[in-house]
Image (spheres, grey):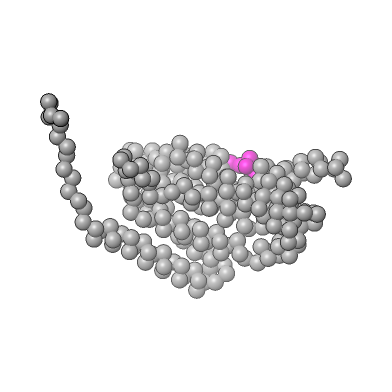
């Protein structure tokens, strides 16, 4: 009934808050916190990563709610079959590979962006919604019992807004700020922080994949390591062009 809609949305919002204030930080911080710390971009970069990460989660919750409303209860059972661990592990391994790649500085002339693009935090935000914990399972079951995909998407969006009230709003910038301070005080640590964070992300990503198939996790681990070695080998083999400084003379045209 229409009169029940505000109460239902409030209940869904509070359900999202219960997730954001409890399981969210424990589940997500090892992934996004490690990435922010390894990038060592400072507090401002950490705030950007926080926005991208939480934006990915919000979009994913709305999409999951819509799919549950469209497909029905079968979608909830399918999602609980382990797909989430596979996606989370794959995204974590991809992020580790990007983090371990040789850094490329911002080009002042052509404006080429840095090597690590903004999509890894966003992808991590999307992927880390795919484990149906108790609050999310309740949301999806409610959406699946609803009359349409649109209502399911609305419930997912309201749930996601509640889940945005999370300690991650503070923890992600704190990790980035800590990494930035370490890099600023000891510049030689920049590469070590980046490579160390990549190793951590690779290991926890493979651990997620191993819950479904240990052999697949081993293959992914070997492929990522081989790809990282190839990227560094190409950098070592690429000759560096000499740099000729421009000299401007007074009176010259």
* Image coords of residue 26 (percent x, y): 58, 50
> Which quadrant: the C terminus?
top left
Residue at the front extreme, as displayed = 253
Can you say whether 233 is above or below 37 in the image?
A: below
Q: Which residues are magenta?
A: 163-167
Q: Is residue 129 above or below residue 79?
A: above
* Residue drawn at (49%, 43%) of the image: 49
Say above or below: 4 vs 236: above
Q: In the image, is residue 165 part of the stretch drawn in magenta?
A: yes
Residue 15 visible in image: no
Asked if residue 58 lies left or right of residue 29, the reply is: right
Q: Is residue 158 visible?
A: yes
Could you tell me which residue is drawn at 76 percent across and 41 percent down? 10
Q: Residue lying furthest top in this view?
A: 251
| Quadrant in the picture for residue 237 | bottom left
- Report whether 244 appears left or right of 218: left
Residue appearing at x 85%, y 42% in the figure: 2
Location of residue 204 in the rendering, given as x and y in whole percent from the top left corner? 50, 59
Taking the image as shown, residue 230 lies to the left or right of residue 78, namely left
Q: Residue 232 sits in which quadrant?
A: bottom left
Q: Residue 172: image x %, image y %? A: 51, 43
Quadrant location of the N terminus in the rendered image: top right
Where residue 251 sits in the image (x, y, percent)? 12, 25
**Residue reaching furthest to the bottom:** 215
Q: Residue at x 50, y 38 (%)?
A: 47
Between residue 122 and residue 133, name the one nearer to us: 122
The main secondary structure of the magenta stretch is: loop
Q: Nearer the viewer, residue 16 or 75?
A: 75
From the viewer's side, name the closer residue of 231 and 40.
231
The answer to if 213 sits in the magenta stretch is no
């Amino acid at each position: 009934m229409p009169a029940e809609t505000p109460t239902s949305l409030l209940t869904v919002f509070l359900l999202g808050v219960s997730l954001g204030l409890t399981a969210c930080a424990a589940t997500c911080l090892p992934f996004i916190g490690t990435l922010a710390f390894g990038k060592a971009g400072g507090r401002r970069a950490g705030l950007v990563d926080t926005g991208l990460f939480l934006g990915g989660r919000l979009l994913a919750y709305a999409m999951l709610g819509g799919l549950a409303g469209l497909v029905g209860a079968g979608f909830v059972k399918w999602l609980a079959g382990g797909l989430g661990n596979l996606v989370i592990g794959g995204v974590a391994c991809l992020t580790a590979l990007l983090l371990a790649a040789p850094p490329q500085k911002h080009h002042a002339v052509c404006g080429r962006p840095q090597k690590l693009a903004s999509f890894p935090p966003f992808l991590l935000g999307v992927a880390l919604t795919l484990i149906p914990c108790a609050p999310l399972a309740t949301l999806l079951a409610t959406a699946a019992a609803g009359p349409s995909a649109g209502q399911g998407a609305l419930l997912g969006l309201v749930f996601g807004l509640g889940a945005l009230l999370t300690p991650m709003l503070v923890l992600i910038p704190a990790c980035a700020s800590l990494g930035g301070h370490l890099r600023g005080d000891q510049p030689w640590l920049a590469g070590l922080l980046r490579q160390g964070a990549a190793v951590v992300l690779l290991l926890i990503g493979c651990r997620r994949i191993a819950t479904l198939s240990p052999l697949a996790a081993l293959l992914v681990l070997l492929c990522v390591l081989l790809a990282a070695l190839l990227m560094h080998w190409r950098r070592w083999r690429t000759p560096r062009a000499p740099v000729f400084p421009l000299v401007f003379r007074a009176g010259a045209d």
